[in-house]
Image (cartoon, rainbow, N blue to C red):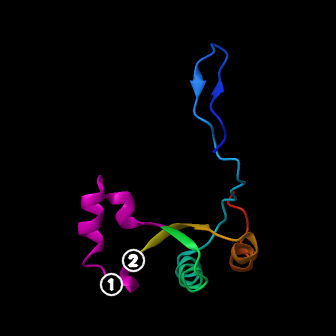
């Protein structure tokens, strides 16, 4: 994270990431395949699914996720973190979200 920065009134604003992040577009099947490949590549993976968007607390999310088989999870987004080369190998064919 970058350092906090002052605005025009001198009030501090929380710093933003200094690491570039691309937002790429993928369909449901692509997200499922990308999640599987990212897991095998041992990348850090954060999932955004219908359950994450429909629940209001971590406890609700845990309760919604627990009985859900993997094939029933509806992925709406993924965040991948790891060595750039590995991430690019998996995401290089995806276009930017417009």
The label shown at residue 52 is: none
Please give the name of the residue rendered at 33% of the width and 59% of the height, measured from the top-left corner: 54
Q: Secondary structure at mark 2?
A: loop
Q: Residue at x 61, y 67 (%)?
A: 81
Measuring from the top left, give residue 11's x and y in whole percent. Answer: 58, 18
Q: List x then y, in percent, for residue 14.
A: 58, 33
Residue 68 sits inside the magenta stretch: yes
Residue in front for this viewpoint, 49 or 16: 16
Count of numbered labels shown in the rendering: 2
Circles 1 and 2: CB distance less than 8 Å?
Answer: yes
Query: In the displayed image of the protein, which residue is found farthest to the front?
Result: 3
| Span of residues in magenta | 47-73
Residue 43: x %, y % from top left: 59, 75
In front of the other: 61 or 73 = 61
Q: Position of residue 44 (x, y in %)?
A: 55, 70
Classed neighbour count for the residue bearing mark 2: other residues with Cα under 10 Å, few (<14), some (14–19), many (≥20):
some
> Which quadrant is the C terminus positioned in?
bottom right
Q: CA distance from mark 1 to mark 2?
A: 7 Å
Q: Write the residue at 39% across / 77% down.
A: 73
Circle on res. 69: 1
Residue at horizontal 62 percent and vertical 37 percent from the top: 15
């Amino acid at each position: 994270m970058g350092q906090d920065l002052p605005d025009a009134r001198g009030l501090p604003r929380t710093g933003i990431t200094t690491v570039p992040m691309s937002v790429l577009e993928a369909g449901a099947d692509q997200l499922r395949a990308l999640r599987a490949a990212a897991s095998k590549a041992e990348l850090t993976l954060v999932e955004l699914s219908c359950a994450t968007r429909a629940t209001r607390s971590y406890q609700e999310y845990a309760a919604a996720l627990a009985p859900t088989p993997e094939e029933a999870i509806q992925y709406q987004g993924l965040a991948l973190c790891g060595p750039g080369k590995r991430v690019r190998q998996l995401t290089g064919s995806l276009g930017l979200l417009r």
